[in-house]
Each structure stands twice: as C-alpha cells, then as structure tokens.
Image: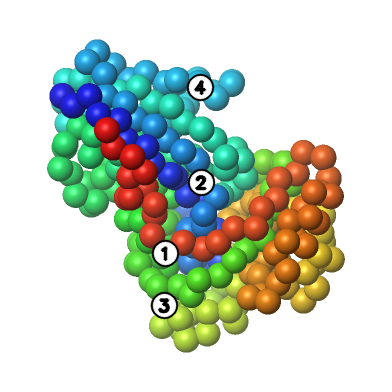
Amino acid sequence: MTKSTVLLRSPAKLNLFLHIVGRRADGYHLLQSVFQLIDWCDTLSLKGIPENTVRRINPIPGVLPDQDLVVRAAKLLKDFCKFEGGVEINLQKEIPIGAGLGGGSSDAASTLIGLNALWNLKLNKEALANLGLQLGADVPFFIYGQNAFVEGVGEKIQGIELENHDFLVIFPHQAIATASIFQAPELTRDHAQITIDGFLASPWSDLSNDCQAVAMRICPEVKQALDWISHALPGSEPRMSGSGSSVFAVLDPKANVAKLENLLQTLPKGWVGRVVRGLNKNPAYNLISSE
C-alpha cells in the first residue's frame, strides 16, 4: 500500500444542447446532447492511509456519508478490488451544489481515477466507467475524460473534438429536481434526432434545450438568469444547461471579459457567475501533484 498523495482537478460540464427524442417502455427518456468540459473545477486530494477505511475530511454540511458521492465512489472501488488499505479524502468545492453542472458526478469520477492510480489497481477506463455508472449517469462521461456526443439515457458516449470557446455561466442559486422536469406532462419528447456528423457540420445551428420551458415554469429564476445574460450580452442566445438551473452563453472571441467580470459583481444576492473556458480533456488525468 502506497503512502502517496494525489491532487486532482474535477471539472464541471455544460450541455451545449439537450434534445429529448423519445421515451422507453420503462419510462426513461431518450436524449441527445453534447457535453462540454469547462475549467470550473473542484479540487480533490486523496491520501493513502494504512487503516482499512475511507475517511472524509471537511464533509459537506448536511450531506451524510451514504449520500456523499466521493465516499461512495471510494468504497465502491475498494470493495470491487478487495483493496486492503484506506484513503483520506479532502474535497474543496468550487462548483455550486445543485447547479446542474455535473460537479458531484465529476468528483466521483475523479475519486475513481485518482484511487486507481494511488492504489495501483490498473483498471482501464471501461472498468472504471462501469463502476461509475452505479453512482450516476454522468459519471462515465467524466471517466472517459473528453467532450462527447451523448445518446440513449446517457450511456452512449462518443468522444468528439470541439472548438475552444469561452462561456458565461450563471447559477441563480435555485436547485431543480430533475424528476420534476421529466415528469412534467408538457415536456417535449419527440425532438427530431440529429447525427454527430450533422452536429459537427453546423455545431451552433440547433442548441435548444427541451427542458428549458418546463424549468422556467418550475423555477422563475431560470428565466431571470437568461434575461440577465441577454441584457449583458445582446444577441448571445443564452440557454439552460441540462435540467438546470444553471444557464450559459457562448462568448464572442471579441467579448470584453474584464467588463463581463465586473458586471458579474452586480448579480442578485446568492447568484454565482463565472467566465469559463472550454476544455478538451478532463484535467483529473493530469495529476497536479504526486508525492
């Protein structure tokens, strides 16, 4: 058992679009989306310890261990590999909780990636992704670690290359229960399917989010955040990411970032906003430090 420590960055993601193209007999919705990694990151420290346990430092207030995705990920991997040893986990959160940016799934993926290296388990990405799927539908995306065209119920992941862009992202400090979106009777469920080639040929032609209208009804702050971006960036066509409540807009390369960052200081109390850059790869695969 190694005594080393690894430090990783866990990125958030945006859904550049979200189309609901059908529904299975079991009620699960069939989706099409493009997942874009962004440089809004949590920081995860994993330290090997001799005790045969998983220990969390600075737990999130109100989150029980059996609900904590990094603890669950560590225990899942430890049990799967029958590893005799332990880990001390310290997670510094930057990605807002409940923002719909995939922060929890990314942290779980980074835990699996980091412990695979720390404990020298030598599992491949497919094995880690299969474990990750037990923790959440988005975890395999972060395990594979690159931008992707996603289909099915989230299990069909095909890596794609995207142009580098900056984005303005705002979380209006209101979480939306995903189930409330997908159970809404007015939700559109018959969006025409597109192909990867079609998307890549014209990547900015149809970036709609079929969940957005329902989310605005359930959570008025979504519309307020969209309106805020439209006022700050006229013509930017902001949209919601995933099932919300975070919203975003693609920035023009000539956008005045300094001015935007000053404007973000005027956001309503409790809101969180950032100018972020798109990433091509999950930085969790580049260990910040290893001792």
x and y percentages locating residue 216 in the rendered image: 76, 55
Could you tell me which residue is drawn at 67 percent across and 41 percent down? Answer: 175
Q: CA distance from mark 1 to mark 4?
A: 30 Å
Q: Is residue 112 left or right of residue 103?
A: left
Q: Which residue is mark 4?
A: 59
Q: Are marks 4 and 2 in contact (CB under 8 Å)?
A: no
CA gap, disc 4 and disc 3: 40 Å
Which residue is painted at 39% across and 26% down in the image?
89
Amino acid bearing label 1: Asn
| Horizontal side, residue 75 vs residue 67: left or right | left
Residues under labels 1 and 3: Cα distance?
17 Å
Are dots 1 and 2 in contact, CB under 8 Å?
no
Sequence-earlier tag: 4 or 2: 2
* Disc 1: which residue: 280
Find numbered disc 1 in the image and state the secondary structure of the residue it sits on: loop
Residue type beneath disc 3:
Ile
Q: Where does label 2 land, which residue?
A: 41
Camera-nearest label, 1 or 3: 1
Secondary structure of the residue carrying tag 3 is helix
Label 4 vs 3, first from the N-terminus: 4
Front disc: 4 or 2: 2
View extreme (top): residue? 51
Image quarter (top left, top right, bottom left or bottom right) of the N terminus: top left
**Residue where numbered disc 3 is placed:** 196
| Disc 1: CA contacts within 10 A as few (<14), some (14-19) or many (>=20) | some
Question: Which residue: 53% across, 79% down?
Answer: 203
User: Reading the chain from its start, which is encountered first: label 1 or label 3?
Assistant: 3
Farthest residue to the bottom: give it: 201
The one of 233 and 200 positioned closer to us in this rendering: 233
* Mark 3: few/some/many CA within 10 Å (<14, 14-19, 20+): some
Query: What's under tag 2, amino acid-wise?
Result: Cys
